[in-house]
Image (tube, rainbow, N blue to C red):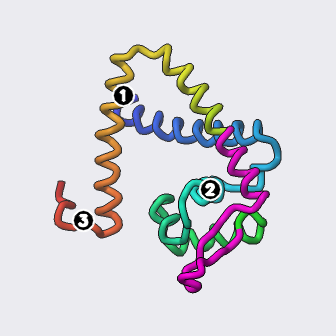
Amino acid sequence: MELNRKFLYLIVEFYEKIQLLDKQYKSLSGEVLDSFGFNEMHCIDFIGRLENPNVTKLSECLKLTRGAVSKIIKKLLRKGAIEIYTQEKNKKEIYYKLTKTGESIFEAHEKMHKKWVEDDINYLSGVDKNELKTVCKFLENYNKFAESRIKILKGEDYENSTD
């Protein structure tokens, strides 16, 4: 198999494995995370961490459109994970906070991530440091490349699309 094709195949396989790992780590957290998708859990995570989280802040953190975040918010409200609040000085601005259900999801998600990171660090401690440096350098460069392609595909950087 040509090296470039093998690389692309391995990237897809890596992505699929990460998704499977996510499901497995979720299952270790019990049923509390079962009915919450990836974006919903991360939205809960940011609501639990941010000061006065609103759609704009969540959109920036999640790197999603305000419309997409609004849809996630509606689901989380229906599931009873979050609630709305306003501040005395500005009743028009809507903010979100975790309910008891949301707090339990926040804690289970955080526990899941800690276990995942711990397992990954244990694995990486056995990897040759020079190999790891090479992979890190490659991933940094690839992420920059991917970001530039995303901007071009979104029409944000037409002048630089002739790279």
Which residue in the protein does label 1 denote?
Answer: 135
**Real-space Cα separation, disc 3 to disc 1, in angstroms:** 28 Å
Residue shown at 65%/54% (left/top)? 41
Q: Is residue 27 left or right of residue 37?
A: right
Query: What is the crowding at mark 2: few (fewer than 14 residues within 10 Å), some, or many (at least 20)?
Result: many
The amino acid type of the residue labelled 1 equals Val
Which residue in the protein does label 3 denote?
Answer: 157
The amino acid type of the residue labelled 3 equals Asp
Q: Of label 3 and label 1, which has the lower sequence position?
A: 1
Q: Is residue 94 left or right of residue 5?
A: right
**Real-space Cα separation, disc 3 to disc 2, in angstroms:** 34 Å
**Quadrant in which residue 16 is drawn:** top right
Residue shown at 76%/71% (left/top)? 78
Which residue in the protein does label 2 denote?
Answer: 48
Mark 2 or 1: the one toward you: 2
Residue shown at 30%/31% (left/top)? 137
Q: Is residue 92 magenta?
A: yes
